Amino acid sequence: MKKIALIVASLAVLASPAFAENAKTTTGNAPAEAKFSTVSKDEMFSSKLKGLSVTNQKDQTIGEITDLAIKNHEVDALILSVGGFLGMDEHYVAVSPSSVNVRYDSKDNKWLASMNTTKEALKEAPEFKYPK
């Protein structure tokens, strides 16, 4: 029994350089250097956008930002939840980020989002469905 254990251990030691060589060839291409950014305190974070109520020009809540669609490293659309109550009859629409005014209210220390539209217009907009 000791001889078998010794043989297995010897084979493992001899095989380790071969495994290490295989590991070198299958790691893929990593970027040469990491690039770092400086983030200022007044920048918007997705965590602050998600769940943010969207109001209209009459200060009525017309929807809620539920998600962001990112394309080519930029926000392509804001996904809004419109209508419904407690998740029932909820309707999602994708709107251009340029149609939503997101700003920080330093007086009340909170983020605000508004659009120049009505809840009815958003309900009539084409429904957004997540790709499967």
Image (spheres, rainbow, N blue to C red):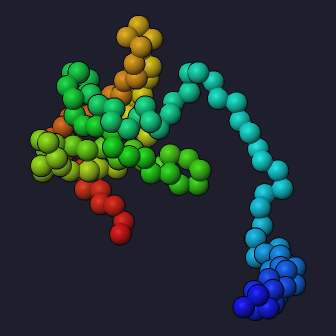
**How many numbered tags mark residues here?**
0
| Residue 38 placement, left or right of 41 | right
Q: Residue furthest toward the front?
A: 1
For image coordinates 43% across by 46% down, the residue present is: 68
Q: Quadrant of the N terminus?
A: bottom right
**Residue 70: x %, y % from top left:** 50, 51
For image coordinates 44% across by 36% down, the residue present is: 47
**Residue 20: x %, y % from top left:** 83, 76
The image quadrant that residue 111 belongs to is top left
Q: Quadrant of the C terminus?
A: bottom left
In this view of the protein, can residue 128 be seen by the observer? yes
**Residue 124: x %, y % from top left:** 18, 49
Q: Nearer the viewer, residue 105 or 96?
A: 105
Q: Nearer the viewer, residue 70 or 30?
A: 30
| Residue 128 placement, left or right of 103 | left
The image quadrant that residue 100 belongs to is top left
For image coordinates 75% across by 70% down, the residue present is: 28
**Residue 78: x %, y % from top left:** 39, 44
For image coordinates 43% across by 31% down, the residue present is: 48
Q: Residue furthest toward the top?
A: 107
The image quadrant that residue 81 belongs to is top left
